[in-house]
Amino acid sequence: MKTRLDQFDASKGFSRGRSGLVVAVWYLLKCAFLLSALPWPSGLKVALLRAFGAKIGNGVVIKPRVNVHFPWKLEVGDHAWIGEEVFILNFEPVKIGAQACISQRGFLCTGNHDYRDPQFSYRNAPITVGDGAWIGASVFVGPGVEVGDEAVLAAGSVVTRNVPVNAVVAGNPASERGVRWRGAV
Amino acid sequence: MKTRLDQFDASKGFSRGRSGLVVAVWYLLKCAFLLSALPWPSGLKVALLRAFGAKIGNGVVIKPRVNVHFPWKLEVGDHAWIGEEVFILNFEPVKIGAQACISQRGFLCTGNHDYRDPQFSYRNAPITVGDGAWIGASVFVGPGVEVGDEAVLAAGSVVTRNVPVNAVVAGNPASERGVRWRGAV
Amino acid sequence: MKTRLDQFDASKGFSRGRSGLVVAVWYLLKCAFLLSALPWPSGLKVALLRAFGAKIGNGVVIKPRVNVHFPWKLEVGDHAWIGEEVFILNFEPVKIGAQACISQRGFLCTGNHDYRDPQFSYRNAPITVGDGAWIGASVFVGPGVEVGDEAVLAAGSVVTRNVPVNAVVAGNPASERGVRWRGAV
């Protein structure tokens, strides 16, 4: 056997960015107010995320059952929407632009491993979603991906490469299918 | 920036169909009895859905952790099955035929937006699942799709176009892979 | 109509393997300790699974919100990891090798139906994940699949055929994209 998960070192190439106590307190509050199906107001969720270091703009809408791993590694622009069952696994920073929409069951996954390293070391990388972009329902966005401003990722896409500004992509693996706005964006 | 989610008008091309109070009461009951992992009997869930306007046949099976957005926009035929973690996002009507099966983690998504409208207006559309059809596990069915009677959508398919009667489809985007029943259906 | 779910016979080609009482008690404990978002220690979850017949090795990590249908049909090798929201629908046995990783939202689905039988009889089949294999995030693995040792299933893959030892697969339907380790495994 080559893979040795028992030798995995979580501190290699990764920092939680907060103490274990802060992580634990956040986790419990997340369970109560974000992961919960109860319809807590977006304002309360935004206030909680900000209290733990998230940079969140005005008018942001956060639906129930949303999973945010580390608020202190999250940035969300004005008037963005985050839909039901969205999973933001932000071991590394996730930046969601203003007026961007992340639809239901979307998954922004910054986590990765070097699978050619027997110790399976982290190869996490940040994700950026541009202003006005739309991450459709059930879309998976992988580590390191930059989604350009105003891009559209069609429902069910699996996106592991950068998406150009104004592009419309679909499929698994996702490929370009057209442009969104005619003329300059 | 072109996209202006802050100017989105949820009343344009969309009606909840019930008062805010009814929506809120339904939401809380949904949390307690449908989204919950607790194994409430199907009969109780069917009774609740009917009390809120759903048309549901006899012998319908509804597993735990099912999400129904608006019961008054749901119709389910006799002896249909709805599996664990199925998400029925029925901004517009969803009709599931008799003897149809929606497997685990399936997503019937009537929600959509006109992404070439800066105000991102709704472009929702109903979904019909024909009698005897099988929506496999982890399948995504998009807005406006009509799934023909006795069709089979293989696990993990992403289906955004109509599926003919008796067809077997698979993939993302889904394409036809064969027929189900030999001879007339 | 051909399909007759009302004539489905769950006992044909399928045995739960335990009494209804054991299944019910397991279900409630599962809700409290596995499906729950609360961060119960892996050791507690492993102990519970073992108490219900699972064969689980040392150093296994089980994250929150994991769904295990029947513990008595589960085998997990030493130092394997099971991530958040993993769904192990093991109507038939699921065997996860040592040092294997099942990432977030993965779905190991042994359930199936003969969709050319009007009574939709079970066609369930076991799943084997080899030692050191990596089932990426949001991957669907279908019934009967054998994932070879050290194989990598890229995030979002839909895998319904066997995966050779050391292969890297991706896509929907998944296809081979390369090898993991150069030289002998």
Image: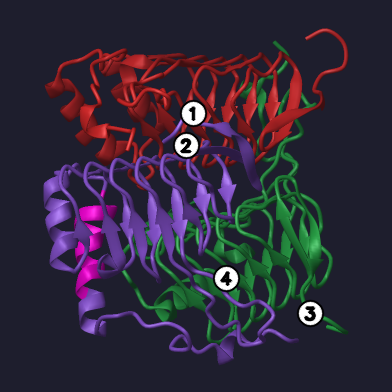
Chain colours: A red, B green, C purple
Q: Nearer the viewer, residue C136 or B172?
A: C136
Residue under numbered circle 4: B53
Tell which residue pokes out farthest to the bottom in this image: C7
Distance between mark 4 and mark 3 Cα atoms: 35 Å
| Same chain letter for marks 1 and 3 | no
Distance between mark 1 and mark 2 Cα atoms: 8 Å
Q: Residue at x 35, y 45 (%)?
A: C131
On the image, the x and y values in percent for residue A10 come to 24, 22
Is the Cβ of the residue at disc 4 closer than 8 Å to that at disc 2? no
Give the position of the C terminus of chain C as an image quadrant: top left
Residue under numbered circle 2: A86
Distance between mark 1 and mark 3 Cα atoms: 40 Å
Q: Quadrant of residue B63?
A: bottom left
Residue under numbered circle 3: B181
Query: Looking at the image, is mark 4 or mark 1 nearer the viewer?
Result: 1
Give the position of the N terminus of chain C as an image quadrant: bottom right
Q: Is residue A151 above or below residue B43?
A: above
Q: Secondary structure at mark 3?
A: loop
Indicate the amino acid at tag 2: Val
Indicate the amino acid at tag 4: Gly
Dot 2, crowdedness within 10 Å: few (<14), some or many (≥20)?
A: many
Question: Magenta residues, as a range?
Answer: C25-36
Q: Which mark is residue A108?
A: 1
